[in-house]
Image (cartoon, helix red, strand yellow):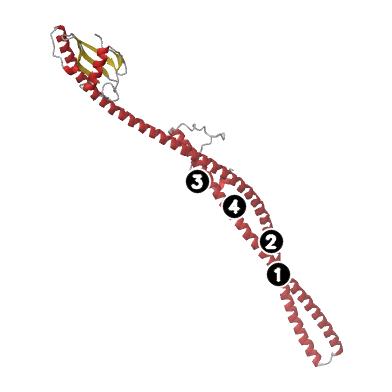
Amino acid sequence: MAQVFSGFKAANVPSPIKGNGAIIKETPLGDCSNEHLSNSRDLLTYYQFHVRAIEGLIKHHEETERKLKESEKSRKALKDRLDNTENELGQTKAKLEETENNLTHTLKELRDSQCEHKDTNKTTDKLKSTEKNLKQAKDGLNEMKHKFESSEGQLRDTQAKLSSLEEEKASLAERYKELNISKQKAIEERDEANERADEADKRAGEEDKRADKEDKRADEADKRAEEAKKRAKTLQSERDGFDQKAQAIQKQYDDLLKISKSNSSFIHRSNRTRGDIYIDEIMYGGTVINDQKVINKLLDYAESNKEFTITNDLMGGDTWRGTTKSFTAVYAVGKKGPFKYISQQEYQKVRFYK
């Protein structure tokens, strides 16, 4: 292939082939590094360069084939002209021989006539005329001989040219066979290069898709991180509100505890009393519960001393969505107390103690 591509010049193209003919080790398909993308592009450039070189070789082969056909046409035309010249020379030679025969016959007649009519003026004049014609015939014969010699020289030159053309034809035929072999190899290498280029394009496309997926995943991760930051900010805000409510409840609890320790009496609210059980406050998820249905359910559990589970349905709804809530109830047994309290997490069980 070094001889095939020796006639082509191109810019320096980065080759993926090492000195010993081995292909540079490729990065696995899953790796989307910049180095792998660069190697894939270099390989694709190398294959494209060879495809262009092969196409140029095919054009050169087609041009050589066209010139060979034109040379064959010229050789045939020259051979036809040589055949025509040989025919003309043969006809000229025949005419020369015929003229020589005529002259010989005329000379014989003149000699016979001289022998028969030596003394007559008429014979002398005829002899002179005949001699003049003979001289003209000889001049014409010499001229025709000169032309014949010239034609023979041209014929020899034409034969030499024909021999040279035959040699050139044989050389071109041999070159044509070599070009056909080179063309077939070039076509095979071009097809192989196209297959490798297609494979490189496919792999580059897959790597681009994978890179796009990674970019998309990174963008989604950034979005999730941003949403997490917003959620954390919202949760922090809710937590601050819950802390404020918890502080208020703690203050109420401290106040109730002071009242309980002093054993002072307190005012019962009739809608929160069942027998000797009085429920003063109910807190669920940072919200004070004043729903009478919820109070009645809790009074039932307190009076029967039954265990119950803290749920949103029991407490009349979800007071803090997405968060595990706490339940606290402040109650008293008897009219003077002291106040007691129970506290438990959502979905856990609890009971009122007398």
Contact, mark 1 vs mark 4 (Cβ under 8 Å):
no
Instruction: Tell me which numbered mark, 3 or 2, is placed earlier along the sequence.
Output: 3
Q: Which type of secondary structure does the marked residue at label 3 adopt?
A: loop
Q: Residues within 10 Å of mark 4 (few under 14, many from 20)?
A: some
The amino acid sitting under disc 3 is: Ala
Residue 61's disc is: 4
Q: Quadrant of residue 80?
A: bottom right
Q: Which type of secondary structure does the marked residue at label 1 adopt?
A: helix
The answer to which of 110 and 44 lies nearer the viewer is 44
Taking the image as drawn, is residue 154 in sight? no
Image position of 327 (left or right of 263): right
Instruction: Tell me which numbered mark, 1 or 2, is placed earlier along the sequence.
Output: 1
Q: Residue 53, percent across and down?
A: 54, 47
According to the picture, the residue beneath numbered tag 2 turns out to be 162
Q: Is residue 27 above or below residue 265?
A: below
Instruction: Tell me which numbered mark, 4 or 2, is placed earlier along the sequence.
Output: 4
Residue 315's disc is: none
Q: Residue at x 14, y 10 (%)?
A: 259
Taking the image as drawn, is residue 159 in sight? yes
